[in-house]
Amino acid sequence: MIPRLHKMGTRTIGLLHYLYGPGTHEEHTDPHLVAAWDPLAPDPGRNPHSTYADLQRLLDQPVQALAASRRPAKHVWHLSVRAAPEDPILTDEQWGDIARRMVAAADIDPGDGAGCRWAAVRHADDHIHIIATTVREDGRKPRRHNEAKRAQAEARLIEADYGLRRLNTGDGTAARRPTSAERHKANRHNQERTPRETLRETVRQAMAGTHSEEEFFARLTSSGLLVRQRIAPSGDLLGYTVALPDDRNRHGEPVFYSGSKLAPDLSLPRIRERFTTPADSENDSGPGQPVLPPVTGPAFARRRATAATWQALLIIDHSDDGTAAVQIAAAAEVLDALAKTSAAHTRKELRDAAFAFERASRSHVKAARGHDRALRQAARDLVHSGPALGQGEDGATTAMLIDMAFFLATTAANWHAKKHHAQQAAAAQQAAEHLRAAYQRAAAQPMGALRQRGRRLALHVQQRQAAFVRQALPELAERVLAEPGWPALAATLTDAQKAGHDPAALLAEATRRRELDTATSISDVLVWRLRRSAHLPAAPDAPHEPPVRGGRGTLPAAAAQPAAKAASDSTRRR
């Protein structure tokens, strides 16, 4: 149940006309009172002898009783309360009870007999609107400090009492929800998302890995958005607004949204924080860090992003809060870039994963900018490498990156849960579920090819690889050998041995890094870990790849080993 406070108004009659009217898109049906400060209050929706003016005069009486100099300029209070889509349809009596609890929680009418006058109007199955005038019967004003938080707290109690969907308590960092009018407009045009949500996704994709304002605005324009910049008389850029070309108001004009109206971290000042950091005052790749080679294609970009994602995962587990928070925020850029450049068969799930993880990227923990360059560079690499094919090395390295992104999302969910960030933890877990589905699609072809190669191995080769598994995973070995993915792991161990690696050592390192006993397919997990760490082609018969070394923001080798060993306790596998 979602209570939403609207802007204070000046005209009681104007809001009543809206609440009892047909709505901006004819969406209001059977408007009527479900509760009011007085059970005998007139209801112009059901009583043909009552008018809007009758109800308005009664609501405004305490305001008009004050001397003109004491009357508040804005006295019309407005709260809407909406049930979740999966909630049962509540009766008028139930909505009336909810309205009374809400005005009491907000101190509009605390039940002392001298509260403000209010009325609750229902014009749809799933929500009500409460209108009130903010002068009490005794002439005092209500105590409205923290009214939004008090309304949210009451909503959580109402959910429990009525057996409704239990929502997580917000912390003020969420993106703005689409309005009812925006949702109805999207439904009329058969659009999956509202213009506000589509703009938020497009702006985030344009921001992923950008290095300057010029590049950011160039990407916005090339994505097809209408862009306006707000310039100060001095010539300084103050802000921006964006619109979809085909989203128009009733006058035929584009509907523009500022970045801050899309999400808190999309305002121009917040975007600028990503461009100028303490670490950027050094050379571009940071002190003591090698300059990374240019990206040569989608597969190479995905390999490098996988390495950066792995390092970020370790950092989240074993760094201070600010550093962990910036890794999670930058991980959202990687998901945005991956969704933008994904192949058709994984595009929907990756878009949904990025859309969900956006909520997990913000909290009240201040992100320590300057520690996110490896992930931001990975996002940049993905964008500049272009769209990936869904097959061959492109498709296989995509599966490898999605596998690692799944771990990062679940690690982020665990980190937020420990900090009691309920909404962010739920969002990260939701993103992980979408990544799980995307992985199944991306991995089907390369895993199928690896399994075929594994089945063609000579029996004595399979037995030798099985011995390595029993040595490295004595407690889980029989489960691994019985999995459908075991032939793919046997083929990978064989490839590693041919490339000069020690299979036993590789397995020992891979199994030491993260826990495995809750994995749905341990063999799948080990295949990608081994192929990444041994620098093997992700797809069978692909050219051998050069090592992909961590660059910006990676852990020093000495620090990575204890971090990797300790990391085995925190992330739940798929």
Image: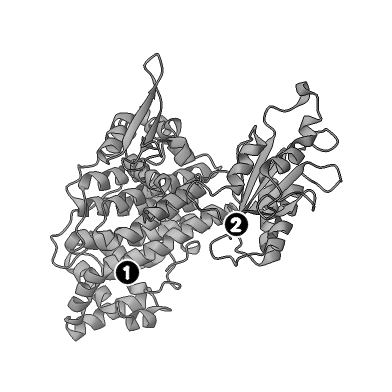
Residue 30 is marked as 2
| Sequence-first tag of 1 and 2 | 2
Query: Please, is residue 234 above or below residue 183 in the view?
Result: above
Tell me the amino acid under the disc marked 1: Gln
Q: Quadrant of residue 243?
A: top left
Residue 517 is situated, as x and y percent measured from the top left of the image, at: 44, 73
Residue 462 is situated, as x and y percent measured from the top left of the image, at: 23, 81
Tell me the amino acid under the disc marked 2: Asp
Number of residue marks:
2
In the picture of the structure, the residue carrying the numbered disc 1 is 440
Residue 533 is situated, as x and y percent measured from the top left of the image, at: 28, 59
- Mark 1 residue element: helix
- Mark 2 residue element: loop
Taking the spot 45% from the left edge, 41% from the top edge, the residue there is: 262
Query: How would you rate the neighbour count of disc 2 (Cα within 10 Å): few for under 14, some for 14-19, many for 20 or more?
Result: some
Taking the spot 65% from the left edge, 52% from the top edge, the residue there is: 45
Q: How far, Cα to Cα, is label 1 from label 2?
A: 47 Å
Residue 18 is situated, as x and y percent measured from the top left of the image, at: 58, 44
Q: How is the image coloured?
A: one colour
| Horizontal side of residue 246 vs 74, given as left or right | left
Taking the spot 25% from the left edge, 74% from the top edge, the residue there is: 488
| Horizontal side of residue 162 vs 536, given as left or right | right
| Horizontal side of residue 312 vs 381, given as left or right | right
From the viewer's side, name the closer residue of 285 and 396: 396
Q: Residue furthest front?
A: 49
| Horizontal side of residue 83 vs 304, given as left or right | right
The answer, for residue 42, to whether it is visible in the render is: yes
Q: Quadrant of residue 249?
A: top left
- Front label number (1 vs 2): 2
